[in-house]
Amino acid sequence: MTSAQRMPILFIGHGNPMNAVEETPLAAAWRETALTIPRPKSILCVSAHWETDGSKVSAMKSPTTIHDFYGFPDELFHVQYPAPGSPELANHVVELLGADEVTTDDSWGLDHGSWSVLRRMYPEADIPVIQISLDRKKSPHEHGEMAKKLLPLRDEGVLVIGSGNIVHNLSLIRWNEDTPHPWAFEFNALATGLIIAGDTGRLTDYPSLGESARLSIPTNEHYLPLLYALALRMPEDPVSFFADQVVLGSISMQSVRIG
């Protein structure tokens, strides 16, 4: 596959799972983005909502739809996303990363970090989807180094999606207004500038970025999927952004297309 045919990489700020069932500008942005890229043969999603001890890759033939949230309308719990899995792709990921680095898992389906976005992008649910977990024991640098080994997938028709949020602080949500906290706006802008500059090193060493980073990333499971996407960036890849909003004061929906 030539560079012109190489699949892009996406990082998507998934935020509120209600975007899966409500017609919002964010849902529209995800749908429109899918129309601008080649149709993938399969999808590998790195979701903020699958953390494990040790890295795992899902290998179910028919992944279940996991409703890993509470307090939402019944409508959301009835949503199913019956995309097929791909044990073959899961085994290929093990080959790329090494059996000492990752193992296959046949118990995890698709959590809402994956299906709430994919339901908008590919509503027919006819593209095979697998997930790779976030190893709690790995440092951000180690996550990025592992992710680089997935680069061949871009030339094999696989769409790699990181699903999380650049800014994600649930404890400081503003339920009654959508005005961003100043620190949330500041870090979202800082991270966007560093992505444009290709400064993955500073983004990986995010604790050094100051108080706005500390407040934006109180825990890093929603931030790490961004590092997976950035690790697969080639020097010639253009970068663009979509769904650039900070909602509920402390959640950035900023999404990134690379390539």
Image (tube, rainbow, N blue to C red):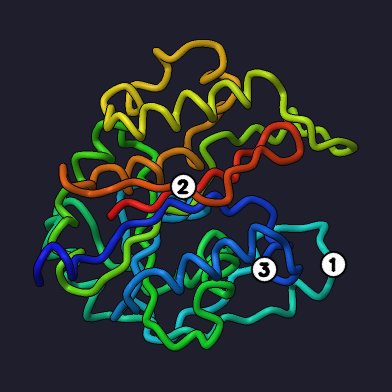
The residue tagged 2 is 241
Quadrant assignment, res 180: top right
Quadrant assignment, res 126: bottom left
Q: Which mark is residue 20?
A: 3
The residue tagged 1 is 73
Q: What is the CA distance from the residue labelled 3 to the residue labelled 2?
A: 20 Å
Image quarter of the N terminus:
bottom left
Along the line of sight, the residue nearer the viewer: 69 or 155: 155
Q: Is residue 150 left or right of residue 36?
A: left
Q: Is residue 188 left or right of residue 192?
A: right
Q: In the image, which is nearer the foreground, mark 3 or mark 2?
A: 2
Q: Position of residue 191 (x, y in %)?
A: 44, 29
Q: What is the CA distance from the residue labelled 1 to the residue labelled 3?
A: 12 Å
Q: What is the CA distance from the residue labelled 1 to the residue labelled 2?
A: 30 Å
- Badge 1 marks a residue whose secondary structure is loop
Mark 3 touches mark 2? (CB < 8 Å): no
Q: Position of residue 252 (x, y in %)?
A: 60, 39
